[in-house]
Image: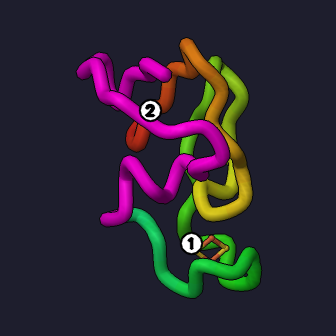
């Protein structure tokens, strides 16, 4: 699969979460701390450690 992170093309495997391609934003990794919020396809405040990537996703780590 191909996704973008802050406009940069990144390869991802099916089933991987956003956290797998932007590990720098992850803290607890289990959906508890809410410190891994990113924007996915224009939707803000998505938990990177919980959102499974789909082909073509656009992830933004800063607004
Ligand atoms: S890393 Fe803690 S909620 Fe995602």
Dot 2 and dot 1 residues touching (CB under 8 Å) = no
Q: Which quadrant would the C terminus be assigned to in this image? A: top left
Residue 33 coordinates in the image, percent (x, y): 67, 83
Question: What is the distance, in whole Å, between disc 2 and disc 1 at their CAs?
Answer: 14 Å
Residue 23 coordinates in the image, percent (x, y): 37, 63
Residue found 66% across the figure and 46% down from its top: 15
Q: To which quarter of the image does residue 7 belong?
A: top left
Label 1 sits on a secondary structure element that is: loop
Residue found 31% across the figure and 28% down from its top: 10
The circle on residue 35 is: 1
Quarter containing ligand 1?
bottom right
Residue indicated by mark 2: 60
Question: Where 36 falls versus 61 (above or below)?
Answer: below
Residue 34 coordinates in the image, percent (x, y): 67, 72
Residue 3 magenta-highlighted: yes
Check mark 1 vs ligand 1: CB closer than 8 Å? yes or no.
Answer: yes
Q: How is the image coloured?
A: rainbow
Residue 57 magenta-highlighted: no
* Closer-to-camera residue (5/54): 54
Residue found 28% across the figure and 19% down from its top: 9
Q: To which quarter of the image does residue 53 belong?
A: top right
The residue sitting at the top extreme is: 56
- Crowd rating for badge 1 (residues with CA inside 10 Å; few <14, some 14–19, many 20+): some
Q: Which residues are magenta?
A: 1-24
């Amino acid at each position: 699969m191909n996704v973008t992170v802050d406009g940069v093309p990144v390869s991802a495997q099916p089933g991987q979460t956003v956290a797998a391609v932007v590990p720098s934003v992850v803290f607890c990794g289990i959906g508890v701390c809410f410190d891994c919020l990113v924007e996915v396809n224009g939707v803000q405040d998505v938990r990177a450690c919980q959102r499974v990537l789909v082909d073509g996703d656009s992830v933004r780590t800063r607004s």
